[in-house]
Image (cartoon, grey):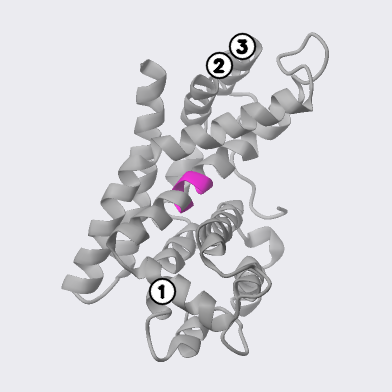
Amino acid sequence: MGHIRLPNLRRTLAWREVVTAIESGASAEIVAARSAIAARAAFEEARHDPGFLLAVRLLAELPLAARTPAYLTELRRLGLNVAREPTLFEFSATLSALPDEQGRRTALTSSERSDLGALAIRALVGSFNALIGPELPSLFEADEIDFQSALGRYARGQAFGRLAREFFARFVQGTLDYYLSRELGNHLGPDQRFANSAHRAAFDTAIRLHCFEASRIVEEYAGGWLGKHVYQEGELTARHIAELGAFSLKKIMAELKRREDG
C-alpha cells in the first residue's frame, strides 16, 4: 500500500505464537484469534485513525445520501469526486480512489497516509459491491437510478446492520491478512502446512468466514445505533462515528478470543 506502515509483529512473542499455531496445524479459528491478539496495537490505532473513521462515516452517510433529493450534492460533500449520479461501477472506482484524492486535498504525501485508511476503504468498497451488486438487474445493465435506489435501502435498521457487519468483518479480516499473507506463504509446499495453493486458499476462506461469524453482534448493534442517532436525535457527530468504530472492533476482537477459548 505504500503508506504509514502498521506495526511490525514478526519479532514479537505474540506473533511467534501465531507461527507456532500455523506450524502445528491449528484451525483457522485459533490462528485468527492469535493473530488478532498479536495485532491488538493496530486495532487500537484504528479507533483513532482518520482514514478508518472516514470509512466508518461513509458507511453510514452514503446510504443516507441516496435517500435525499440532493443526492449528487451530498456525494460531493462526502468527498466523492463525481460529475453525475454514479452507477455501482463508477461509485466503487471513485470510492477506491478516495484515499489518494483526500491526500491531495489535504496536501498529505503518500508516506503520510495510513494503511489502516486504505484497508478500511477497501473493506467499504467490497461491502457495497457484495451487498448491492446482487440486487441490481445486472452489473452492466443497471443504471445510476437502480444503484441509487439500492444504496438507499441500506439507510434503515436491519439493512444497515447487515452492511455494517459486512464492513467490519472485511476490515478485521483484511487487517489480519495484512500480517498473515506473507507468513502463510512460508508454509506452502511439500511437507508444509499447506501442500498446495488450493489448501492455502481454503484456509483463507475459513479465516474470512470466521471473521464474519465473529461480527454477528455488530449487525445487532449497528441498526439500533443508526436509528438512535439519525432518526431520533437527527444527527451523526464525530463522537457517534468513533463510537460505532470502537464498539465494533472491540466486540469482534472479544468474540475471536472467546471462540478460541471454546
* Residue 252 visible somewhere in the drawing: yes
* Residue placed most toward the observer, 135 or 189: 135
Tell me the mark number nearer the camera, choosing from 3 and 1.
1
- What main secondary structure does the magenta stretch of the protein show? helix
Instruction: Judge from the rendering whether residue 75 lies leftward or rightward of residue 224; answer left or right.
Output: right
Where, by quadrant of the figure, is residue 154 drawn? bottom left
In the structure shown, which secondary structural element does the residue marked by tag 2 occupy?
helix
Instruction: Give the amino acid at mark 2.
Output: Glu
Is tag 1's residue or tag 2's residue first in the polypeptide sequence? 2
**37 lies above or below 212:** above
Instruction: Judge from the rendering whether residue 39 lies leftward or rightward of residue 153; answer left or right.
Output: right
Badge number at residue 56:
none
**70 lies above or below 37:** below
Tell me the mark number nearer the camera, choosing from 1 and 2.
1
Stretch of the chain drawn in magenta: 167-171
* Residue placed most toward the observer, 227 or 235: 227
Decide whether residue 8 is among the magenta residues. Answer: no
Residue at the left extreme?
232
Badge number at residue 152:
1
Where, by quadrant of the figure, is residue 110 drawn? bottom right
Label 1: few (<14), some (14–19) or many (≥20) C-alpha neighbours in 10 Å: some
Badge number at residue 17:
2
All told, the count of numbered labels is 3
Is tag 3's residue or tag 1's residue first in the polypeptide sequence? 3
Name the residue beneath numbered marker 3. 25
* Residue placed most toward the observer, 252 or 20: 252
Instruction: Give the amino acid at mark 3.
Output: Gly
Where residue 130 appears, as percent x and y from the top left, is 55, 56
Where residue 131 appears, as percent x and y from the top left, is 50, 58
